[in-house]
Image (cartoon, coloured by chain):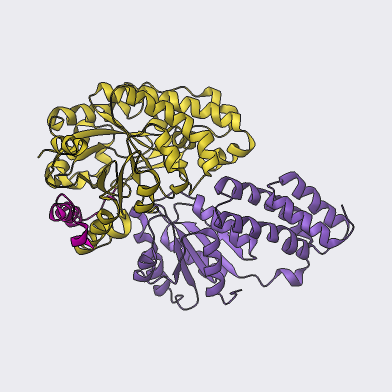
Chain colours: A purple, B yellow
Amino acid sequence: MSDQPESLFRSLSDAVVGMDEDGTRSLSTNAVERGLDAYTAIDKGLVDGMSRAGALFESEEYFIPELLLCADAMYAGLEVLRPHIKRDTASQRQRVVIGVVEGDTHDIGKNLVKIMLDASGFEVIDLGRDVPAQRFVDEAAARGADVIALSTLMTTTMDAMAEVVRLLKDAGLRERVRVVVGGGPISQNFSDRIGADGYSASAPGAVKLVKQLTGRAA
Amino acid sequence: MTPIQRFAAYGRGEAIDRLPCVPIVGNTAARVIGVKVSEFRGNGRVIADAQIAAYRRFGYDVIRVFTDLYTQAEAMGARVHYPEDETAYLEAPAIESASQIDTLRPADPHKDGNLPHHLEAMERTVQAVGHEAVVTGALTGPFTTASFLLGTETLVRLTLKDPAAVHRLCELALENGLAYAEAILDAGCTPSVTDPMCSSTVISPRQFAEFGLPYLKRLIGYIAGRGRAVTLHICGKTRAIWNAMADTGAACLSIDNAADLSEAKVTVGHRVRLMGNVPPSEIMLQGTPSDVRLAVRHAVLQAHDNPNGYVVASGCSLPVETPFANIDAMLDAVREIGWPVRAEVLA
């Protein structure tokens, strides 16, 4: 391994894309021991690796199993590096409240979006699955979230998404909080009809959408 | 023509009155006889009554005795949640880690879980209308059942980290599936196989070749060996595995609306019949009857000249609350189009 920080960051990125959890962990430890900036190691190493993995997923070279193992590697690295982030770089992340709406427990899609949002620097508050509509609104209010992301695979629970939008209006938060929706039975038409702010068919697409809506479009 | 006469004539290339048509009615059948979806649980008679009534109400060609995908996994220990009036969903897998695989046993279809009730529903349905309509029983594929036994995320991680464990679990799920397939056949029904986790939306075509295909081949091979033509449905994206799906020995592939029927026709239509793929959520649930009509015409235009035949169908099981008017509109549209299909009129 070269002594150049850039080279270590590249190795970190490669370890994430290569689904190498142990390698990512030890490279992250190495970065800490060498006193490299943790935020940069995350950004140029872990996040870069995860975004390459996302691109491979979009081009159908990677599938859900590969993406999950890349995420396992990324999280292993984050666990090592995050405690070393300097405060000033850590504080301005935008917040996304995410979950599977009430009545549904299919959460792979939600988990993929969460992973990709994590990797894109958002602070993700994951409410899990089978989440009542009111809880999304309460959490968004309490945590000052910028975005609520709703997922379902079931047609039976789609109406719960409309309910979140209604409750958000009732709470007077609709102007401040963007709502994005996704999942098997969801479409752009459905998103428009319930007054959500956007729909995406894929996890990497959802991240682009959230970036656009929060003014972070690349 | 009765559905059986229609399929027989269509298969021989003789004249028919219209293309076969299958809006895939599952729990929507509860609405036809005014019961709650949860009343299907443990009650073969009610499932049969609902399926028979739905068939008579709408006049489609294939009855599929189906409530949810979890019956086989449930009979092996997975926990299923039954909402009062919606489709059941998986609450917890049967086991938490690969180390517990050896504690699992294949279910006895005549004793365990809800399997005996589903078999009863199949028997009753065959007795009532089996002389005129094709009656199928839903059979979940081994890889998908394995995902319900161990949890999907755990299983798909293991496909890369511990393939041998995945094969052990798929083998058990296959054994379970074969016993249930035998019981379905003995009930006078044709198993219809669904394996959504094999979708390229979830795993790669390479992983399908390793963990899906070999088990589907043995399952479908057994059913075909007993003289039945099998329909195989895999949800989501499937383009890259159409030929492998035909390699399973299935006679008909049911294509999801996430995939393209014209491409399927070109790629694999010389090997298998196709069915699909009117969008179940966006069109059948949320659309108007005229949206349904348009979608049916579009699908027929794409696939009516498939070399091995085409069945107009929804791209997946219909949502419970699909309006009856939309199911009627699907059948009406197919009757209007008639047979032989005149593409120039549709375009």
Q: Was residue B55 drawn as part of the magenta stretch in this picture?
A: no
Residue B282 in the image: state x and y as whole percent. 32, 60
Q: Which segment is the magenta one?
A: B318-347
Where A94 falls versus A6 (above or below)? below
Give how far across and how far down residue B176 sits, in percent.
41, 25
A122 left or right, relative to A172 = right
Secondary structure mostly seen in the magenta stretch: helix
Percent coordinates x, y for residue B27 in the rendering: 26, 44
Q: Nearer the viewer, residue B287 or B267?
A: B267
Q: Is residue B43 visible?
A: yes
Residue B334 inside the magenta-drawn segment: yes
Q: For the point 21% across and 39% down, which residue is it?
A: B62
Q: Nearer the viewer, residue A202 or A75?
A: A202
Left or right: B129 in relation to B191: left
Snapshot quadrant of residue A114: bottom right
- B295 horizontally vs B219: left or right: left
Residue A56 vertical placement versus A192 (above, below): above
Q: Quadrant of residue B308?
A: top left
Above or below B253: residue B337: below
User: Residue B107: x, y in percent?
Assistant: 40, 23
| Quadrant of the image containing the C terminus of chain A | bottom right
- Number of marks drawn: 0
Q: Is residue B24 something that shows in the picture?
A: no
Determine whether, in the image, residue B226 is placed left or right of residue A22: left
Q: Is residue A189 above or below residue A28?
A: below
